[in-house]
Image: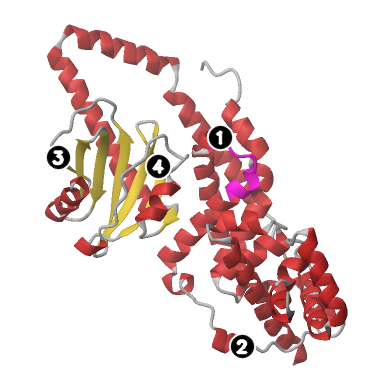
């Protein structure tokens, strides 16, 4: 009744944070691996971000928002699908010897984005997260480290292992 | 750098994460090493497949609308919190309070109840919306510094695994309109939220217990901090946690 203008906090938030909704959904979608859970996570994360927006002082609103999305996703994973959240990278199974992925043969056929998505989704959560943030969102090691709450060295090794594993999955699929 | 060391750097090299000098050293090695060159090419092939096939998901329009609507509702609820009516009401309450100690006591009690209600709601929400912790760690030296810069006080963080109350992590939450630190402990399968906020110039108080909607709430003041512990755990065991925290 006394309201004259839209809440300034809301418009500030919409300007700084909402442009990153695609990135947020992309991360949540790869972590949760289904539409509905990803949407729930993003909605919840957006509300949490809004609540704490007043205390956000940083420059990088994308990394800040993505870290909230990531934490919300992992909390849901741990709660609802603990077996999945605790998957460890099986070096035995995934093999240290990587079959070569032949440029021009193997991946030119990988036109179908579903194939790539499925390959990423086979990785354990922390590795999906690293690949998504690096390859699809083009974030730096430092930004990924901040979001994932892990040292840069860890991010570097996750990335190397995740890429090796993607090569294995994709070359297997296309050599059939 | 030798071959093995360079090999380790091929991923950061491909990502443009190396400083100029190191990058040149890698380039130099690549010219003479077929093995590394092949690996570097592999990384390139994979990366271009990932980028070219654009596997990124885009937020559905419906989600965008839902998020905006939810934010509007939240913003409106906030504004109501500061409406002139509330300010007027608070003023009126204060005036009446001056008039009578008994009434003041009543208001205090109801405000205490309102906080207890909020404590329980926060606890339930932390379980329902599945956002128990922002920083998941049983290491007090990880959880305590996490709060630095997020709240304007330094909460006491202790892992009590040895006593059967493992620390699960920490979280920011809201209580009485203020940002508070929430520590999460577990006792068997029961999650326990401990909310902490500064109580400037308040004396230590004994623990006061209440029960609301099946949850036990213990509140106390210690070293100029207000504490609330809430859980579905039985009161006796919850008190044990508090004894441990106060030590």
Q: Which quadrant of the rendered structure holds the C terminus of chain A? A: bottom right
Instruction: Check chain identity for marks 2 and 3: say if they share one.
Output: no
Q: CA distance from mark 1 to mark 3?
A: 39 Å
Quick check: can you spot residue B58? yes
The CA distance from mark 3 to mark 4 is 22 Å
Q: Nearer the viewer, residue A165 or B103?
A: A165
Please tell me whether residue B102 is drawn above or below residue A46 in the rendered image. above
Give neighbour class at mark 2: few <14, some 14-19, many 20+ (Cα, 10 Å).
Answer: few
Looking at the rendering, the stretch of residues picked out in magenta corresponds to A56-65
Query: Rounded to the nearest whole Å, what is the CA distance between mark 2 and mark 3?
Result: 57 Å
Left or right: B124 in relation to B22: left
Q: Say which mark, if any, is on residue A95.
A: 2
Residue at image x 26%, y 35%? Answer: B226
Percent x, y of residue B90: 33, 15
Q: Chain of mark 1?
A: B
Residue B13: % across, % down? 76, 67
- The image quarter containing residue A162 is bottom right
User: Which one is earlier in the sequence, the residue at label 1 or at label 3?
Assistant: 1
- Secondary structure under the numbered disc 4 in the rendered image: strand
Q: Which mark is residue B72?
A: 1
Contact between labelled residues 4 and 2, with CB atoms less than 8 Å apart: no
Q: Which residue is mark 4?
A: B173
């Amino acid at each position: 009744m006394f309201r004259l203008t839209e809440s300034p906090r809301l418009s500030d938030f919409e300007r700084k944070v909402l442009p990153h909704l695609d990135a947020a959904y992309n991360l949540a979608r790869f972590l949760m691996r289904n539409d509905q859970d990803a949407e729930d996570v993003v909605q919840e994360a957006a509300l949490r971000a809004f609540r704490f927006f007043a205390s956000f002082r940083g420059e990088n609103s994308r990394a800040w928002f993505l870290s909230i999305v990531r934490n919300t996703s992992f909390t849901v994973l741990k709660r609802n699908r603990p077996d999945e959240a605790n998957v460890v990278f099986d070096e035995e199974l995934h093999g240290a010897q990587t079959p070569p992925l032949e440029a021009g043969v193997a991946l030119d056929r990988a036109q179908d984005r579903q194939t790539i998505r499925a390959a990423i989704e086979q990785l354990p959560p922390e590795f999906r997260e690293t690949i998504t943030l690096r390859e699809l969102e083009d974030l730096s090691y430092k930004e990924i480290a901040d979001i994932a709450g892990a040292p840069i060295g860890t991010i570097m090794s996750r990335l190397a292992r995740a890429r090796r594993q993607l090569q294995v999955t994709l070359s297997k699929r296309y050599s059939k | 750098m030798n071959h093995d060391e360079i090999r380790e750097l091929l991923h950061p090299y491909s990502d443009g994460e190396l400083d100029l000098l190191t990058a040149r050293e890698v380039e130099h090695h690549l010219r003479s090493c077929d093995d590394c060159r092949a690996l570097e090419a592999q990384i390139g092939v994979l990366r271009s497949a990932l980028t070219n096939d654009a596997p990124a998901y885009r937020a559905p329009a419906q989600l965008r609308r839902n998020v905006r609507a939810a934010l509007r509702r939240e913003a409106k609820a906030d504004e109501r919190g500061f409406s002139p009516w509330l300010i007027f009401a608070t003023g009126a309450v204060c005036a009446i309070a001056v008039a009578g100690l008994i009434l003041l006591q009543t208001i205090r009690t109801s405000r205490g109840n309102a906080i207890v209600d909020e404590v329980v709601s926060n606890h339930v929400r932390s379980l329902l919306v599945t956002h128990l912790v922002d920083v998941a760690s049983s290491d007090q030296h990880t959880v305590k510094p996490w709060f630095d810069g997020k709240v304007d006080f330094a909460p006491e963080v202790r892992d009590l695994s040895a006593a059967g109350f493992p620390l699960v992590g920490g979280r920011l939450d809201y209580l009485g309109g203020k940002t508070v630190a929430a520590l999460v402990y577990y006792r068997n399968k029961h999650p326990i939220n401990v909310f902490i906020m500064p109580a400037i110039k308040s004396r230590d108080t004994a623990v006061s217990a209440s029960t609301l909607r099946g949850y036990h709430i213990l509140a106390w003041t210690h070293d100029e901090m207000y504490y609330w512990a809430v859980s579905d755990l039985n009161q006796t065991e919850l008190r044990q946690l508090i004894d441990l925290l106060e030590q």
